[in-house]
Image: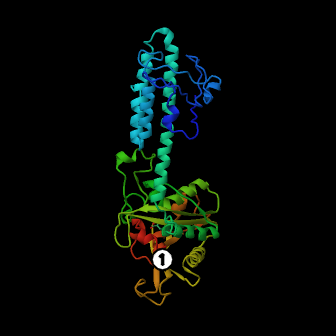
Amino acid sequence: MSYRPARGQSEAERGEGLVGRTCGRPSDRFVHGLPTRHKRVEKRAPEPNDRSADEEDGPAAVTPGEPGGELGPPWDDLLAAALAAVREAADPGTLEAARVRFLGRNGEIPAALRAVGRLPAERRPAAGAAGNRVRTAVAAALTERAATLSRGELDARLATEVVDVTLPGRTPRQGHPHPLATTRAELERIFATLGFAVAEGPEVESEWYNFEALNMPSGHPARDSHDSFYLEDALAGEPAQGEGRLLLRTHTSPVQIRHMLARGGALPVRVVCPGRVYRRDDDATHSPMFHQLEGILVDRGISMAHLKGVLAEAARGLFGAKTRVRMRPSYFPFTEPSAEVDVSCVFCGGTGCATCKGSGWIEILGAGMVHPAVLTAGGYNPEEVSGFAFGIGIDRCAMLRFGIDQMRLLFEGDLRFLEQF
Ligand code: PHE
């Protein structure tokens, strides 16, 4: 049942007389506009200005609602008290207290309604109906008062709080790729233009892929230089039969072996393998974790000249068109012959500076012709095919590209550093 207040009336007035004035002061007033569905309990002649008397199914005529009266409990007293409490509640907390007091589970109105059950049977319907109307009227008054109070709160906040629309907005900080990520992407792009695909492999590798297949049998002195991180046997689980112990890969060359085996003898083999690698090194220019991009090309008739051409092209792509490369003889177990490859100093252009220690050259990678034992391990016949391989330090390239002198800076995640790129 909805409660529609007549315009211009206070809450109290609207509720007043709902069941008539009480306790020996019978009211002759009706509340207008309160729809009721119960039957009239008492007939009475309508007064000329009493609109409700004309309404069909209008409100009940009144009977004093004293405890023993026709309508049972003192409904009008309750109604008046409840409406007064609602009207006087100046804040939501007080209003809630009024609700609990009158309509709560153990409140006064529910208690009075329970008392109706103890009236003589013939008086219960009218008394119950009167009580229900009181409950409805109080509930409606509570709802309306709550709305008024919250409107008032909002008005007060709107009146006191000030929004300064001229303040500058808070711009969300924008992220951007890490210098290592851009360098790696740039290298991949350069080698893609030269026909190289990208292959990736596991960072936890077996000794077979990381050493054995790369012509470094156990006991080979070159294993020392790799200062490997081996996994504890308990952590490592069972390595595959014949693959030896597990370790964090010390280079991405094992991916080249995996890729050759996956190609199953098909030609050409032409991939670059970027990724993280791990060695027990830690100083200004070394970190125990760093990044490599290794490449391999195997086909018929591949020579050192192809290697130099590809590397020169890559160096020009990465450091600029004027960059030159040179090769110095070196040694790697997996290539023969092997070379260290230098680029003309990216800072001084080759005239000599502090970074290149006056030499005009900076070493950036190792390379060579793939050793026959490695081709065999990868499933290729060294009598029929040949190939070259190279390994570039991505971190070193990034340091040269951006003029960074501490490798640690690349891994510390300090925004003051990273935001410069
Ligand atoms: N795998 C070598 C390393 O990590 C780099 C390399 C790759 C050298 C291929 C020569 C040829 O040291």
Quick check: can you spot residue 337?
no
Residue 331 lies, in percent from the top left, at 44, 72
Residue 18 lies, in percent from the top left, at 52, 27
Q: Local crowd at mark 1 within 10 Å, few (<14), some, or many (≥20)?
A: few
Name the foreground residue: 385 vs 132: 132
Check the image and name the residue furthest to the top: 121
Quick check: can you spot residue 78?
yes
Q: Amino acid at mark 1?
A: Phe
Look at 48% across and 27% down and name the residue there. Answer: 135
Q: Is residue 399 above or below residue 345?
A: above
Check the image and name the residue furthest to the bottom: 351
Name the foreground residue: 179 vs 186: 179
Q: Quadrant of the N terminus?
A: top right
Look at 35% across and 47% down and name the residue there. Answer: 233
Residue 290 lies, in percent from the top left, at 43, 65
Which residue is denoted by mark 1 in the rendering? 402
Q: Is residue 220 above or below residue 318?
A: above
**Label 1's element?**
helix
Residue 40 lies, in percent from the top left, at 58, 18
Q: Is residue 299 above or below residue 349?
A: above
Number of marks in picture: 1
Look at 39% across and 31% down and name the residue there. Answer: 101
Kindly indicate the quadrant of the structure image that contains residue 85. Answer: top left
Name the foreground residue: 163 vs 123: 123
